[in-house]
Amino acid sequence: MTSKIANNPLPGAWPSLPAPNFGPRLEMNDTADAVPPPYSEQDRIWDVARQTLPEKIPERPRMIAVMGPTGTGKSTFISKLAGQEMKIGHNLTSCTEEVEEVPCKVGDQHVILVDTPGFNDTNRSDTEILTALADWMKSSYHDKMLLSGIIYLHAISDTRMTHSSLQNLRMFRKLCGDHNLKNVILATTKWSVTPLEDALRREKDLTSEGGFWRTMMTAGSVVRRFENSAASAKNLVEEILDMGQKKIVPTIQKEVVEGTKLVDTEAGAFIEETIALLQKKHDEEKQALLEEVQRAKEEHNRSMQKALEAERRRLDKRMAEKEEEQRQLHMTTNEALQLRIKKLEEQEAQRMAQDAELEEQLQQLPKKDKHMVKLGFWHLNWRCQICKKKAEPAGVWTCPDCGHVQLNIY
């Protein structure tokens, strides 16, 4: 979990008080809200402190999760409200890799917005994302920081409900639980870049009888539009806050706190089911490819044979990745933690190697060119190699839009 609270403290720093004890488990069924844990000594200290020093002990912040597929504008939404720059993706690559907490203030209410990674991600498996989300849910539970609601974003610019969007929506319901849908806002984004007639038709497809969102609306979710402004984001958050003071406990949070293995959670079981379907599809595709390869051999069609062999290798690689993901899904908590640490170490080593390589390229430049690079005069029309945004000429340079590190000498 990544928290931005330490670097962006809430107005009026809180005094050091014992963290409330949230109890060992939840008492909750599928239709009722969570029963509050026993009133602890830490809770009594907090309440006495607030009564004694109300001007110095603000109410605890309300926490709202922002969820949805990659590219729907989660980081943009949070940036608009929090008034600070978030790492925003401009292509199919996700920029939110971990759960991030971003503090802000809406009126007199302190709020923590939780930026979550979308599933079907370009860089991480669904199992890795679920593990990160489950870890955060467990940690926030023990810190007695429950969600007040969830804002689920969907890009109205999508011409249809893509496979990725549908998988994210189904996963969201597994994570959230239908009993919490009354605390969910389904918000459409990217209205400004979509022809109004198309946007209205797609909105109707989502909300009409038989639409993708209809059953969630029946369960209490409301549909709104995010119009890419701070005022629009503020309205959505205020609506969540007005839904009542009762906190919600998503299904995945209840499951992990009670010690359910990740593979046995509703979301984990859904991932495993998806992998099993992919395995079956892979076997069928591979068998068809082998038959085509044999036919190409008989016809002495070497070009076709080469292309089919490459496709078979691609299928095998993809299936190997899914098998590894399935193995991770069955890991214990400690095994999963060790794997995450190992991957973070590998990412850091890769970043350091890339920085060293770029610095070496800079050192190999002629002295005159090196001096011009450092002064920022070399090639005034640089653009990022990934997102194509205009670059600032500064030698070894990190794009603020997509985070790509490059050396501006071309």
Image (spheres, rainbow, N blue to C red):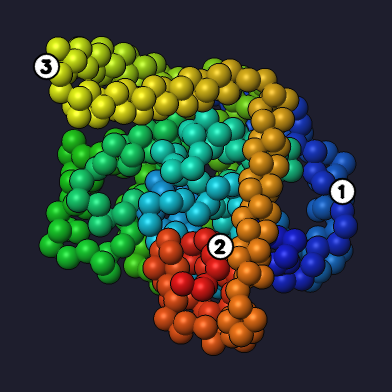
Is residue 200 visible in the rendered structure shown here?
yes
Drawn side of residue 313 relative to residue 107, left or right: left
Q: Residue at the location (73% across, 25% down)?
A: 334
Q: Camera-side residue: 377 or 246?
A: 377
Q: CA distance from mark 3 to mark 1?
A: 77 Å
Q: Secondary structure at mark 3?
A: loop
Q: Amino acid at mark 3?
A: Glu
Q: Residue at the location (48% across, 33% down)?
A: 126
Q: Secondary structure at mark 1?
A: loop
Q: Amino acid at mark 2?
A: Val
Is residue 249 visible in the rendered structure shown here?
no
Does the CB distance between marks 1 and 2 fall below 8 Å? no
Does the CB distance between marks 3 and 1 fall below 8 Å? no
User: Which mark identifies residue 405?
Assistant: 2
Does the CB distance between marks 3 and 2 fall below 8 Å? no
Residue count near mark 3 (Cα–Cα under 10 Å), binned few <14, some 14–19, many ≥20: few
Residue position marked by numbered label 1 in the rendering: 18
Residue count near mark 2 (Cα–Cα under 10 Å), binned few <14, some 14–19, many ≥20: some
Q: Residue at the location (53% across, 79% down)?
A: 393
